[in-house]
Image (spheres, grey):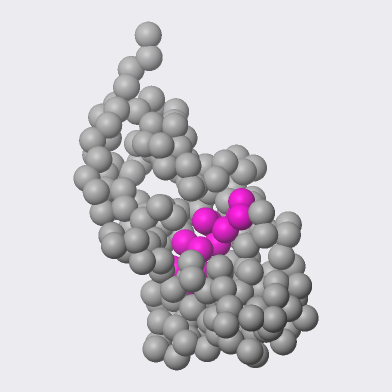
Amino acid sequence: MRTLHPLSLKVNGEAIETAVAPYKTLLEVLREDLGLTGTKHGCELGECGACAVLLDGRPVLSCLVVAAACEGREVATVEGMAGRDGQLHPLQEAFADLGAAQCGYCTPGILLTAQSLLEKNASPSRDQIAEALSGNLCRGTGYNQIFEAVEEAAARMRGERRVSHDDERWAQTGDPLAAEVRKR
């Protein structure tokens, strides 16, 4: 017989009371017990960043955190990024506008890691963005679009919206989607 341990924590601002097996990781509790599948199950070794969430405001790899260690703590997942009114976070908007997500598997972890960066540094350099995201692997984008989207989100958060799908500068990038934008 397995013993379950009570666990109280806040997830995306909501108080949660549950019971977990002592061996379960935070990733498993989020996905399997709480149904928050935005946090991705990647390598299970802490090497890919797909499972990154914010624990008390700091990015952690949820596959390496024992859920019981989260007692009384606050967890933020990608499901909690958008406002209660459904308004996307500026990072989510910039990722969509600049095509920074390909398959999207790595995107939740990257978004949360970038959110943590932008909360500490409103104007990060490209090198600071690269350093902050160095633990997040992406096999689809080559990272330039990701870095550009983080820079764009930072600018939007400072009130300096620079690019959108309708922006002619963005439409001149040579991207096939941009060609469609130019036709409008």
Residue occupying the far top of the picture = 1
What residue is rendered at 39% in x and 88% in y?
Answer: 159
Q: Nearer the viewer, residue 6 or 177?
A: 177
x, y percent for residue 178: 69, 77
Tell me the quarter of the picture where residue 174 sits.
Answer: bottom right
What residue is rendered at 57% in x and 41% in y?
Answer: 41
Q: Is residue 142 above or below residue 60?
A: below
User: Is residue 42 rendered magenta in the image?
Assistant: no
- Quarter of the image with the N terminus is top left
x, y percent for residue 5: 29, 26
Does residue 137 appear to the left or right of 165 in the view shown?
right
Count of numbered tags = 0
Q: Main secondary structure of the magenta part?
A: helix
User: Is residue 109 rendered magenta in the image?
Assistant: yes
x, y percent for residue 165: 58, 78
Tell me the quarter of the picture where residue 45 sits.
Answer: top right
Does residue 18 appear to the left or right of 21 in the view shown?
left
What residue is rendered at 69% in x and 81% in y?
Answer: 183
Q: Nearer the viewer, residue 73 or 162?
A: 162
Boundaries of the magenta span? 104-117
In this view of the protein, can residue 25 be seen by the observer? Answer: no
Q: Is residue 82 above or below residue 63?
A: below
- Quarter of the image with the C terminus is bottom right
